[in-house]
């Protein structure tokens, strides 16, 4: 009873879940809370316990079902309490709705005065699908501690992620078997993560065009010679390309292109895609384990290409410590020009940040307040941490 708690509830896809657990953990450190993780949606099978001799999972008799149905409209949410002005002096718990559809009232969570009030509540129940760390850096009360914890601002998720998320033995088996069989022996490993946000499954020609335009322009893949069958001299150098996607079409096209034609520089290129699950199915155990194994395998690349807006890609990039080439989001099913750019930092993007000056009580561009919190490359309204030094 001496402790205060933060309960993380399982919600959304795996990339989102990993980013929100990391955000929740950092918030728990800043506010002296114990983080408790809901093992639902297969989360319990994916990770080893990060803290020796104890468990971060909610005890099995915890009445989590009671809290699962909370949403943006729930009267128990802090946002709705602020909206209706019925803020009780000391409720036993409060629900924090920090998901993509949250209201301006929910966003007041990021104001220092409200943080002071939240300190008095023993149990906070969190539902989020956002990497909300960048906005924690804008709350004055936490700035000193954050600077001490992360003197280099653009490695927050890199450190939190590598500390918290160790694959469980089953997933580690999947990772090492795949790595040893297909990736380990190459001179260079290129990871290409293709995430398409479209109602149809694809494959789409414009996405393939974009991937090729990016990888050829940035010299991540060599050109092919369509005129001659063999281009000497053959180099011993080999490159493996790990493709991850829900669809197998991109991988098949790329692999065929480099089978049918020689590379102009003699490099040997092989393509591998561990799975093609077709549809997101985030409640299923094996589906989640494959997704986690693929995120981790991507993070072992030497060079990476990731897709805009995708938290799956952000996690791979953060764990790897690389600055990937980011494929811009296509509009009207057309490959964007330029097709990609290298990101400013390995940090994930906060997709739904507040734009509010808590002191002045008016709107403000929160991407312009301090040098280390900037707008993202792939989402103009998103926020990400960058290192200015
Ligand atoms: P986001 O939607 O791209 O931000 O990433 P999430 O990880 O939150 O949700 C997408 C989910 O779809 C993943 O967790 C997987 O379940 C599935 N998925 C998407 N892309 C891939 C992929 O390349 N490989 C696998 N195995 N699953 C994927």
Image (cartoon, rainbow, N blue to C red):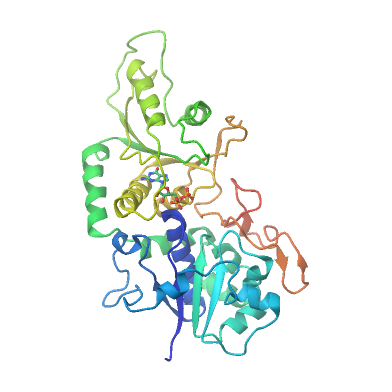
Q: Residue at the location (67% across, 57% down)?
A: 367
The answer to whether 344 is drawn above or below residue 368 in the figure is: above
Would you say 175 lies left or right of 26 here? left
128 vs 177, nearest the viewer: 128
Residue 362 location in percent, x, y? 78, 67
Residue 167 location in percent, x, y? 30, 58
The answer to whether 93 is drawn above or below residue 162 in the figure is: below
Count of numbered circles on the image: 0
Dividing the picture into quadrants, the one containing residue 336 is: top right
Q: Residue at the location (67% across, 70% down)?
A: 105
Give the quadrant of the C terminus: bottom right
Give the quadrant of the N terminus: bottom left
Q: Residue at the location (41% across, 40% down)?
A: 303
Would you say 248 lies left or right of 6 here? left
Residue 139 visible in rendering: no
Residue 113 visible in rendering: yes
């Amino acid at each position: 009873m001496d402790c205060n708690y933060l309960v993380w509830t399982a919600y959304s896809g795996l990339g989102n879940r990993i980013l929100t657990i990391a955000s929740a953990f950092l918030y728990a450190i800043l506010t002296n809370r114990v983080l408790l993780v809901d093992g639902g949606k297969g989360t319990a099978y994916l990770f080893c316990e990060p803290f020796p001799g104890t468990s971060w999972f909610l005890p099995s008799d915890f009445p989590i079902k009671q809290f699962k149905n909370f949403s943006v409209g729930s009267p128990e949410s802090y946002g709705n309490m602020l909206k209706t002005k019925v803020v009780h002096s000391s409720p036993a718990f409060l629900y924090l709705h920090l998901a993509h559809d949250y209201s301006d009232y929910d966003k007041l969570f990021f104001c220092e005065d409200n943080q002071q009030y939240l300190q008095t509540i023993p149990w906070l129940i969190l539902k989020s699908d956002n990497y909300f760390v960048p906005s924690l850096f804008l709350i004055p009360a936490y700035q000193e501690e954050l600077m001490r914890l992360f003197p280099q601002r653009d490695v927050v998720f890199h450190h939190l992620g590598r500390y918290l998320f160790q694959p469980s033995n089953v997933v580690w088996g999947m990772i090492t078997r795949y790595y040893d069989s297909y990736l380990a022996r190459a001179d260079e490993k290129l990871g290409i993560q293709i995430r398409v946000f479209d109602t149809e499954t694809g494959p789409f020609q414009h996405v393939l065009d974009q991937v090729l335009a990016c990888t050829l322009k940035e010299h991540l893949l060599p050109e092919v010679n369509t005129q001659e069958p063999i281009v000497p001299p053959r180099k011993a150098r080999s490159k493996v390309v790990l493709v991850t996607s829900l669809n197998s079409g991109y991988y098949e096209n790329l692999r065929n292109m480099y089978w049918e034609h020689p590379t102009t520089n003699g490099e040997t290129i092989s393509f591998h895609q561990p799975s093609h699950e077709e549809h997101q199915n985030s409640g299923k155990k094996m589906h989640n384990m494959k997704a986690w194994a693929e995120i981790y395998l991507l993070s072992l690349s030497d060079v990476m290409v990731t897709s805009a807006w995708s938290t799956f890609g952000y996690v791979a990039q953060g764990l790897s410590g690389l600055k990937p080439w980011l494929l811009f989001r296509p509009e009207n099913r057309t490959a964007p020009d330029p097709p990609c750019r290298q990101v400013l930092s390995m940090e994930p993007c906060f997709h739904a940040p507040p734009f509010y000056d808590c002191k002045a009580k008016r709107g403000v561009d929160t991407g312009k307040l301090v040098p280390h919190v900037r707008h993202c490359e792939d989402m103009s309204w998103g926020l990400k941490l960058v290192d200015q030094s």
